[in-house]
Image (spheres, rainbow, N blue to C red):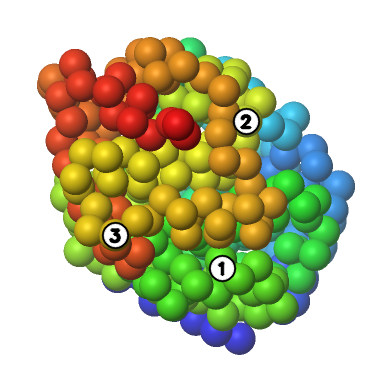
């Protein structure tokens, strides 16, 4: 088993190993005296793993209740969050109990936001079951729900007490869901690891998921330690996200997060080249990496429409939007872009 420490205000471990889902109760009992746990998951993941998690928790002397919701971005709303908070209240969970987020980024976001706010905060554990959640969404403490105006506009920072990544869960993923995670792995390579980028770009990395998960988590853990609350250096992790969130919004979330971020990274690389920000052609290798991992290269939306959607992005500060651009593969920079110039950057990011 591999382990990556995360040195946030509340330090914790990210454990990576085969079979962790089946022994999650034992791992949780090492740090918690909880009597009860609420599993938060979606209907798809519930059918696959909820019973295993329940049995493990109960074997460790923790009684279990569960809250599940329809899978998909459409569930990541204040309405679902409200139902979850009421459920926790009706189940009489106390501050000495805990929440277990089981699934991808959406259960993690909802469970984490509930953990941050129910009774002013109770512990929670992340058990990611998608590649994207394992390498990115489950680590770092960002939790949120969407509003009609934009993605992740209501939320809180809430670090988990433990993250348990079981790579065996990745074997049940549909190809397109696995590819979503590959986009985030490409992101980590572009921002801080040319060798990691080259492994992902080769397209044959799936034989060693533990190594890739560990490397991505270690990169994120280092950045989170430097800037836990996303006021400076941590914003580098948003590479591709200003473009990507706009794509998601205009598609009504029919284009998934990973695919949208992949397109967004390519658009950012093209814009960086055309505005003289990059020092090498980053767009070509990023495009090849996306293709090798089954990810799309375009979205079909107009620059004007994307710029308008990006205006509500939470990364906007006054009259600028903080955007991330690659200088070279392995290093990115943060640049404030005036809102009035957003359309020009989106247009520069489109294929000629």
Label 1, on which residue?
A: 200
Q: Secondary structure at mark 3?
A: loop
Q: First in sequence: mark 1 or mark 2?
A: 1
Determine whether, in the image, residue 239 is placed left or right of residue 111: left
What whole-number distance in Å separates the C-alpha atoms at marks 3 and 2?
29 Å
* One can see residue 3 in this view: yes
Extreme residue in the bottom direction: 1
Label 3, on which residue?
A: 280
Q: Secondary structure at mark 1?
A: helix
Determine whether, in the image, residue 49 is placed left or right of residue 260: right
Residue 295, percent from left and from top: 63, 47
Q: Residues within 10 Å of mark 3 (few under 14, many from 20)?
A: some
Label 2, on which residue?
A: 255
Q: Residue at x 29, y 29 (%)?
A: 345
Residue 189, percent from left and from top: 42, 65
Q: 225 or 270: which is nearer to us? A: 270
């Amino acid at each position: 088993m591999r382990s990556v420490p995360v040195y946030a205000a509340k330090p914790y471990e990210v454990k990576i190993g085969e079979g962790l889902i089946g022994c999650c109760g034992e791992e949780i009992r090492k740090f918690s005296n909880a009597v009860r746990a609420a599993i938060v998951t979606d209907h798809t993941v519930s059918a696959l793993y909820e019973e295993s998690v329940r049995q493990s928790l109960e074997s460790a002397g923790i009684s279990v209740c569960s809250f599940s919701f329809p899978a998909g971005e459409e569930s990541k709303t204040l309405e679902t969050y409200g139902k979850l908070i009421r459920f926790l209240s009706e189940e009489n969970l106390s501050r000495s109990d805990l929440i277990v987020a089981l699934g991808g980024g959406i259960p993690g976001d909802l469970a984490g936001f509930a953990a941050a706010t129910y009774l002013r905060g109770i512990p929670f554990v992340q058990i990611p079951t998608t590649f994207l959640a394992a390498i990115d969404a489950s680590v770092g403490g960002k939790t949120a729900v969407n509003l009609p105006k934009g993605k992740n506009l209501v939320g809180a920072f809430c670090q988990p007490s433990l993250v348990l990544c079981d790579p065996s869960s990745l074997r049940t993923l549909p190809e397109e869901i696995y590819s979503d995670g590959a986009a985030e792995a490409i992101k980590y390579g572009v921002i801080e690891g040319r060798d990691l980028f080259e492994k992902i770009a080769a397209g044959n990395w799936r034989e060693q998921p533990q190594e890739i998960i560990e490397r991505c988590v270690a990169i994120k853990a280092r950045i989170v330690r430097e800037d836990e609350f996303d006021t400076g250096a941590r914003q580098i992790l948003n590479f591709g996200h200003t473009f990507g969130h706009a794509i998601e919004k205009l598609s009504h979330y029919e284009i998934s997060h990973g695919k949208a971020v992949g397109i967004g990274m390519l658009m950012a690389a093209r814009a960086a080249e055309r505005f003289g920000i990059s020092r090498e052609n980053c767009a070509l290798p990023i495009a090849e990496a996306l293709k090798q991992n089954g990810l799309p290269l375009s979205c079909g939306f107009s620059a004007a429409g994307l710029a308008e959607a990006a205006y509500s992005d939470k990364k906007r500060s006054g009259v600028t939007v903080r955007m991330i651009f690659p200088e070279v593969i392995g290093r990115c920079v943060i640049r404030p872009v005036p809102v009035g110039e957003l359309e020009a950057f989106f247009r520069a990011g489109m294929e000629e």
